[in-house]
Image (cartoon, helix red, strand yellow):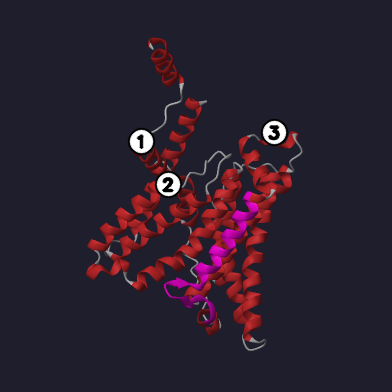
Amino acid sequence: MTDTVTQTAAADALAPSRPTPGRSAKHGIARVLSNRAVQIILVEIVIIAIFQVLSPSGAFLSEANIRGMAITASQVLLLAIGQAILMSAGQIDISQGAAVILSSVFSGQLMIALTGTLPVPVILVLGFGMAILTGVVIGLVNGTLVGIVHVNALVATLGMLSVATGVAQVATGGVNLFGMPNELQSWFGSVSFGALPLPMLVSLVVILIIWAVYHFTPWGTHTLAMGSNRQSARRVGIKTLQNTIFIFVLSSALAGLAGFIDLARYSTTNISGHLNDSMAAIAAALIGGTVLTGGRISFLGAIVGAFLAIILQSGLVIVNLSPFYQTIAIGVMLLVAVSLDRSSRAASKRDS
């Protein structure tokens, strides 16, 4: 009898412990709360509540403001995803804002020149194509400088930031363009499905396609491998040069699309704006969990990080704070993002 009891106790001691339902639930909640994207969403909920209380008559969550934030998001999300892909390969692009400006200028000039000579749908399609083409050319130059000439990405895109902005100012004489076809706004820029603007829907579809290609084709694996160790990636046969040029082209093409959306939204250019867009996109990607030095990317994190920047900008405006505070907010976001990135890398080294 004693032997039987002893054997049973020994078996119980050696058997793997079964977590209780309560402990499993707590563990599951802890895992969810440790996710960077979930943490950002919780912060956003708190910030939204604060701005809703501070805004006049609760205007922050009004349909008009939500629609405005959504259409702004349609541009920022594109830039953040482009930046996240570049960062996953160990690259960076601070010329995105200039690409937005120049693509909108060239697209606007083309549509103004063609007005009255071609059917409006054709003009809009050509304007859209010009915006994308402008972004592609900028990306080709950036990618060539980085991949072939071996200029540091920060230096190359810093130069492009100055060049593209200067070209836009020369092309317009420093004056914003007006006179785009009214249909640009009425057929696209101001079209909404409830609170969801059509430009936002277009951006989400584009991002979904990019996410699917990145995750379900070798391209994503190759890009992450380049970010982890570029030399090793080259040795195993990954075409690092072609992929470097491609991701810079993709980033600037997305900026071109953002430029067309900006043009459609206001029916005018904004050649003095958007210069901080790259900083917001970098901050969004970093806060979302994409690593600055490459090897890791979070599409969902970049998206919620982009919304954090938009919520802050919109909230500061609606509570009647100076626009200069928006610049401060983006700067703080960037500093926090870099700090989180360094903490994440330090933690990874300790774990390894």
Q: CA distance from mark 3 to mark 1?
A: 45 Å
Say what amino acid the circle numbered 2 marks.
Leu
Disc number placed over residue 231 in the picture, else none: 3
Say what amino acid the circle numbered 1 marks.
Arg
Residue 33 figure quarter:
top left
Residue 152 figure quarter:
top right
In the image, taking residue 213 as reference, residue 191 lies left or right, namely left
Residue at the location (51% across, 54% down)? Answer: 80
Q: Label 1 near label 3: C-beta < 8 Å?
A: no
Which residues are the magenta region? 187-215
User: In the structure shown, which secondary structural element does the residue marked by tag 2 occupy?
Assistant: helix
Where is residue 225 drawn, in percent x and y? 65, 39
Callout 2 crowding tier (Cα within 10 Å): few <14, some 14–19, many ≥20: many
Q: Which quarter of the rendered picture does the N terminus lie within?
A: top left
In the image, taking residue 53 as reference, residue 103 lies left or right, namely right
The residue under label 1 is 23
Residue 169 figure quarter:
bottom right
The residue under label 2 is 334
User: In the structure shown, which secondary structural element does the residue marked by tag 3 occupy?
Assistant: helix
Question: Is residue 213 magenta-colored?
Answer: yes
